[in-house]
C-alpha cells in the first residue's frame, strides 16, 4: 500500500501533479483550486506578483567617509535581468541539477530526475532559477538523501574578491 492508501489514487495523482506541474494541472486530476494553491504554496512558497519584498530601496546607503550610495531601481532591475546575468543563473542552475541527477539514488523507469525552471519575468526584481524534483522518485530521493542540498553545496557562491 502506498503512502496515499487511505486517500486513494486521487491523492497520489494530486501529489504527482504538485511535484511536476502547476495548480491548474492539480485541478485537472481532482484537486479544488483552493487545495491546489495550498499544495503549491506549501511545496514551493508563495508565488511572486511583483509586490511584497520585490523592491529595491531608494534610500541612501552609507558607504563610509560621509559618502552614500543611492541605487536607481530601474537600472538595478535592468542589470539583474540582463542576458549575461540570466545566462550565468541558468548555467549554475543546470550544473546543480546535473549534479543532483548524478547523485540521485535509483535506476530505470523510477530514476529520480531533477529539473530547472528559469524565471525572467519583467514584473520581478531579478531573474532566478528553481531546481526542483521532476518526478515523485526525486521527491522521495531528496527527502531521504538531501540530494538537492548536496548538489547545491558542490557549487558554492562565487568567492568574495579581496579588497586589499
Image (tube, helix red, strand yellow):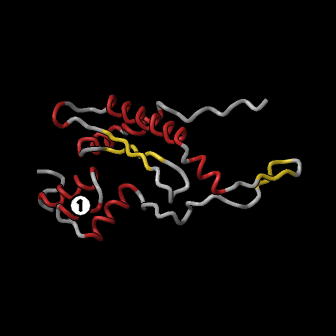
Name the quarter where the C terminus is drawn: top right
Image position of 118 (left or right of 81): left
Nearer to me, 17 or 142 = 17
Judge the density around disc 1: few (<14), some (14-19), many (≥20) Cα neighbours within 10 Å: many
Residue 42 image position (x, y, % from top left):
36, 60
Q: Return the x and y of residue 12 as percentages of the image width and height.
A: 18, 55
Residue drawn at 72 percent across, 30 percent down? 162
Q: Which residue in the protein does label 1 denote?
A: 26
110 vs 4: above or below: above
Q: Quadrant of residue 115?
A: top left
Left/right of residue 118 with respect to residue 38 in the rendered view: right
151, above or below 59, in the image: above
Nearer to me, 12 or 33: 33
Question: On the rendered structure, is 160 left or right of 20?
Answer: right
* Image location (x, y in percent) of residue 94: 40, 35
Q: Secondary structure at mark 1?
A: helix
Q: At x 59% / y 50%, what residue is drawn?
A: 78
Q: Decide if residue 63 is on the left or right side of residue 154.
A: right
In the rendered view, tell whether residue 163 sits above or below residue 116. above
Amino acid at each position: 500500500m502506498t503512502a496515499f492508501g487511505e486517500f486513494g489514487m486521487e491523492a497520489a495523482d494530486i501529489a504527482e501533479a504538485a511535484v511536476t506541474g502547476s495548480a491548474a494541472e492539480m485541478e485537472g486530476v481532482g484537486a479544488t483550486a483552493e487545495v491546489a494553491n495550498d499544495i503549491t504554496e506549501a511545496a514551493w512558497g508563495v508565488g511572486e506578483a511583483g509586490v511584497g519584498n520585490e523592491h529595491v530601496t531608494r534610500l541612501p546607503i552609507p558607504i563610509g567617509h560621509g559618502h552614500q550610495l543611492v541605487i536607481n531601481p530601474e537600472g538595478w532591475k535592468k542589470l539583474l535581468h540582463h542576458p549575461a546575468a540570466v545566462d550565468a543563473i541558468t548555467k549554475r542552475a543546470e550544473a546543480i541539477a546535473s549534479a543532483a541527477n548524478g547523485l540521485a539514488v535509483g535506476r530505470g523507469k523510477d530514476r529520480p530526475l531533477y529539473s530547472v525552471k528559469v524565471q525572467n519575468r519583467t514584473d520581478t526584481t531579478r531573474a532566478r532559477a528553481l531546481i526542483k524534483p521532476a518526478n515523485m522518485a526525486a521527491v522521495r530521493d531528496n527527502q531521504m538523501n538531501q540530494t538537492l542540498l548536496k548538489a547545491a553545496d558542490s557549487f558554492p557562491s562565487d568567492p568574495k574578491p579581496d579588497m586589499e
